Image: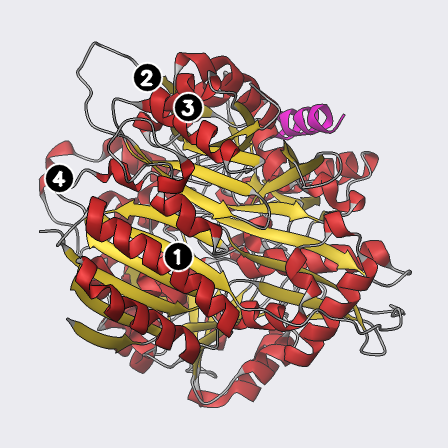
Amino acid sequence: MSLQTTPYLTLTLALSARADHLAVVMSFVETSAAVFGLGRPEQGKLLLATEEIFMYLSGVVCPGKDLEVRLVNGLYYVCAEFRFASPELDLGGLNITSTISYDGEADLQQMGLLIASRSVDRLSLSVERQRVALAVTKEKVYPRSTETLPSPEAGEGTAVETPDRERLKRFAVLARQALPDPDRPSFLDYPGKLVDMAAAGDCQVLTAFGEKKDIVGGILFGHRTEKTVWCCGPYVFSRTRQAETAAALLAACIAKIARTKALGLLSLSGLPEGLRADFEPLGSLTFRPAEGPPVARPFFYRHLHEDPVCEVWTHAELADHLRREYDRLVLAREIRLLTDMGEARSGRSLFSAEVNGERSEVVLRPELPGADYAANVERHVRFLRGDRYRNLLFELDLGVPWHAELVPALLHNGFHPAILLPFAGHSDLVIFEAHETEP
Amino acid sequence: MRPNLDSLVPAYVREFEPYIPSRPDPELKKLYGCRRLFRLNNNENPLGPPPAAQEVIRRFPPPQGAVYPSGDSYYLRQEIAARHGLDPDQILVGNGANEVITFVIKAFCEKGDNIVTADKTFAVYEWVAVFSGIKARVIPLKDETFDDRRMLEAVDGNTKILFVCNPNNPTGTYWTKEKLAAFLDEIGGERIVVVDEAYCEFVEAPDYPDGISLMKEYPNLVVFRTFSKMYGLAALRIGYLAGDPGVVDMIRRTCVVYSVNSIAQEAALAALRDDTDHIGRTRALVGQGRNFLREEMAGMGLPVIANEGNYLIVRLPGSDTLAYRKLMREGVMIRPMTGFRYPNHIRVTLAQMEAMEAFVAALKKILS
């Protein structure tokens, strides 16, 4: 057992996955989370998830194996990561809907990971280079802004700058005042959280200043993946010179990312009508809130460079849809059809599940291939709906050939392809969606 | 065992995005479903190399392929030096101007140093600096022109090189001799000023300066030239720099010898000696293309930035990168300018009328 600190506010505990080490893990997580500034109630919830996960790993997934527990201070959240080597392990048990009982039909109460996901804001899983990382994240609680600021006037001449923390908080207040709920990312209600997100490097903000140094607008952006940058806005708060301010903010955002690794800019919300010609409409996802009718979330995208063209893999059942989409989006692709030549398949497939309790949303991603796609997809849909998740999404990376094997299982379990994101994975990504009202 | 790339590779290399060149023309034609492709994206010369250079390429003896080239482009340096009244040791020839950019940055910059250039200019100065771990300070253009005042303000104790693209790619604007000399006066001898004259042979304006003629007065001035544009030798990759003997002696220490192949050296030599008015014919073609596109774009209500060089910029009513893909389907390849920090603009090479007409027809179609 060893404890070490690493830069970037991470604490690491190395031990074996044994039930009798639980007290050490709990003490480590509790102490570290307190040091990182997580409030008492949130610490308690992170501990609940930690207990559930550690017991599940030490009892079912990797008993006795070397395990690293890392506590990451993300400034506005604390994340507990459980990392271990995967060779020779059956990782099927890491599916969020896997049961800890072996008596056949499971019930929700026996699903360790699903239980863990209930007490935190996010649960995620990644498998890379034969290393597994299972992570639970609990966000800090920030005071909601109640301040009211007068509407600014743009005047002539607008400058775009990166704001300091006080101006950043004022930007959040103005955004909350000016923007209706569906167009406004929830973190804008909490100015302190926005400051910490920017300080952690999870988002960048550019603000436009009018002649009197008032903040007249802003745009938020950050990396979604290595090659895709998301943005919200540009938002404009003044009544005059709205088009010019929005265009200046977007141009400044593009100037920041034009010579980075990013290939594309994805607008998640708040794109003004006047700037839509600068983007390409990808389609929309339908978000089902707890109350009220479903809300369409349109996605707009723009390439930052010439399209580099790529190979995409698909199953015959999705091929026509992809051809239509690529034709509509004017994207040249080499579409490769998966072939089944009768080869044997074995093992249990593994999907990672990114659970967002606040949005009642689960994003599933294939991590390992197997021979049980239909059963695994059916099981995820059944149990996640049973646990009242209203928004189920499944991402397939068209640059990973075996992902295409999942297409029939998805289509037969109520998923349908909703949007195609260029270069959001190894190549393009298709997001399937399924809703509770569907069969 | 796999190498641990996270610890082996410096962060500034890991973070850098490798440039992805476009696929060969036959592949692009197949992918976009077009039968012919007008290449208006790289500012190539549609007339090709001057006739004398073409003859050298045609007659290159295949057995010579087994023999190493002159390691320092001996005869070519003699010719260039004689034309400019320099010593041959003041010339360094590289595998395209991109290679000489690398030589200069390697020679003068180390960790903690910075370079100063413009935000909307040839990207390679910034790229080479960044993936060498050197900070690039990019100054916004003013009226589409390098902003001398703000560049001077950006200089600090760690600034080693200032890059000025003259005329600027992509805006075609240039500094006059007076402006360049005033800038060099203010910089003094503590820093290197690189003037990239890749497109100098296209400029006919009388107040455009010949950077090489200023080197005696300003020994910290280094001038880049290329054979890829006016001389149509882009496929052979050859360019050079000229500078003060002491400065070039330092740069030579970072220079890779034998990087310039024999055909390139001989073709470049022949291009300089060609007496068929290749430059005049190219300028006439470029001028005709520029006038034609100016008129056509004005008719379509599209603003243009058209100055010197064999290119111009068109501002579109929407995404330039989408326009690139749509124009590819029509068999016309242009350069979208978002990567140059000019979103919604495209750069078009001024070429033969057939290509210009094809571009206009395709643009009208995709915007209709």
Mark pair 1, 3: CA separation: 25 Å
Q: For the residues tagged 2 and 1, is the chain the same? A: yes
**Relative to B94, is A271 above or below?**
above
Q: Dot 2: within a 10 Å radius of its alpha carbon, few (fewer than 14), some, or many (20 or more) residues? A: some
Residue B365 forms part of the magenta stretch: yes
Q: Nearer the viewer, residue A195 or B143?
A: A195
**Camera-side residue of A244 and B42:** A244
Q: Give, as a single range, the part of the protein colored magenta.
A: B353-368
Q: Amino acid at mark 2?
A: Leu
Closer to us: mark 3 or mark 4? Answer: 3
For the question of whether residue B76 can be seen, the reply is no
Residues tagged by mark 4 and mark 2 found on one chain of the structure: no
Q: Is residue A72 magenta?
A: no
The image's mark for residue A49 is 1
Question: Label for residue A378?
Answer: 3
Q: Chain of mark 3?
A: A
Residue ID for mark 2: A338
Q: Secondary structure at mark 1?
A: helix
Q: Are marks 1 and 3 in contact (CB under 8 Å)?
A: no
- Residue at position x 81%, y 39% in the image: B298
In this rendered view, identify the residue nearer to me: B48 or B360.
Answer: B360
- Amino acid carrying mark 1 in the image: Ala
Element marked by disc 2 = loop
Q: What whole-number distance in Å separates the C-alpha atoms at marks 4 and 1?
A: 72 Å
Q: Which residue is mark 4?
A: B64
Q: CA distance from mark 3 to mark 2?
A: 22 Å
Q: Residues within 10 Å of mark 4 (few under 14, many from 20)?
A: few
Give the Cα distance between marks 3 and 4: 68 Å
